[in-house]
Amino acid sequence: MREIQFREAICEAMSEEMRRDETVYLMGEEVAEYNGAYKASKGMLDEFGELRVIDTPISELGFAGIGVGSTMTGNRPIIEFMTFNFSLVGIDQIINNAAKIRQMSGGQFPCPIVFRGPTGSAGQLAATHSQAFDNWFANCPGLKVIVPSNPYDAKGLLKSAIRDNDPIIFMESEQMYGDKGNVPEEEYLIPIGEAEVKKEGNDVTIVSFGKIIKEVYKASEKLKEQNIDLEIIDLRTIRPLDIETIINSVKKTNRLVIVEEAWPFGNISTEISHQIQNKCFDYLDAPIEKLNTADTPAPYSPVLLAEWLPNQNDVIKSVHKVLYQK
């Protein structure tokens, strides 16, 4: 076991799968000559050459469409968006082609493609570069959506995503690329659609995913000093949603707080809240709390941005609320 950065885990996953399967290739802006905008493809051009690590013009619709079309000739592309904010330019290819080809062809054409890149806020990038689209893509049947929170999960899930025969949205974060974690040298895969209980506890269930879960871990340490024991679930996969892991936890703790970096209307937290109240209402001893960003575009000011995002203090307040503590 060695400690590597998130970006290195992503690079290892792509490189290992490209060595294993010659139909896998990487395409996107700055992925080749520049080694990736966030250096997540460092060294890959040298190893695999320009036919398999392909720099593109600034044309997300174009290279997303090329990727989708190439799946129909037997390829397994990895399409990198410099940020998922730019995926909106190519969203027609994702929603109307990648997600629907299998059904519209009567099963003749699977679409084994991975669209990956950073999502959410990353500091002072302002309103048009600080948006989380996890729930947007999860709303579309035919897509699978993965949002890892650490290097170990990122590598295992990305390898599984590349081997999957369905289109995958794989969301990362600029603010996680430098995060370090233990990752085995030997090969491993993490199944798509399985959440993980990162910390067992008895008092309150906390569900989160992506980089915002780090605020949950911070809150957990402070709440431990108050003898409050959190159970923390990292969803890892947004769609398919592992609701059973959440249900089992809520049956134990009887309380649920959901922490998500997304606008509050119609998000993943809303869906989880509905499913939990529908499937285990009798186990709840308090209304479900969900923490999201403020219902505004992301501010540029770092002071306002800190208030806009959920933080550890917000988590602590929500935990106290479901415990009926002031």
Image: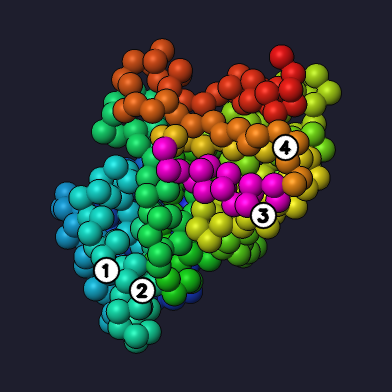
Mark 2 = which residue? Answer: 111
Which SS class for mark 2? loop
Query: From the image, which quarter does the C terminus lie in?
Result: top right
Closer to the camera: disc 1 or disc 3?
3
Mark 4 = which residue? Answer: 255
Q: Quadrant of residue 107?
A: bottom left
Upstream in sequence: badge 1 or badge 3: 1
Report whether residue 3 is seen. Answer: no
Upstream in sequence: badge 1 or badge 4: 1
Task: Report the residue at 72% width, 37% height from top.
Answer: 255
Place of residue 319 in the rendered image (x, y in percent of width and height, measured from the top left): 69, 27
Upstream in sequence: badge 2 or badge 1: 1
Check disc 4 and give the amino acid type: Arg
Task: Report the residue at 45% width, 43% height from top.
Answer: 267
Q: Are marks 2 and 1 in contact (CB under 8 Å)?
A: yes
Place of residue 33 in the rendered image (x, y in percent of width and height, measured from the top left): 26, 51
Question: Looking at the rendered structure, which numbered label has been put on residue 275?
Answer: none
Q: How is the image coloured?
A: rainbow
Magenta-drawn segment: 265-281
Which SS class for mark 4? loop
Q: Quadrant of residue 155?
A: bottom right
Query: Cα distance, mark 4 to mark 2?
Result: 40 Å
Q: Based on the picture, tell me whether residue 254 belongs to the magenta stretch.
A: no
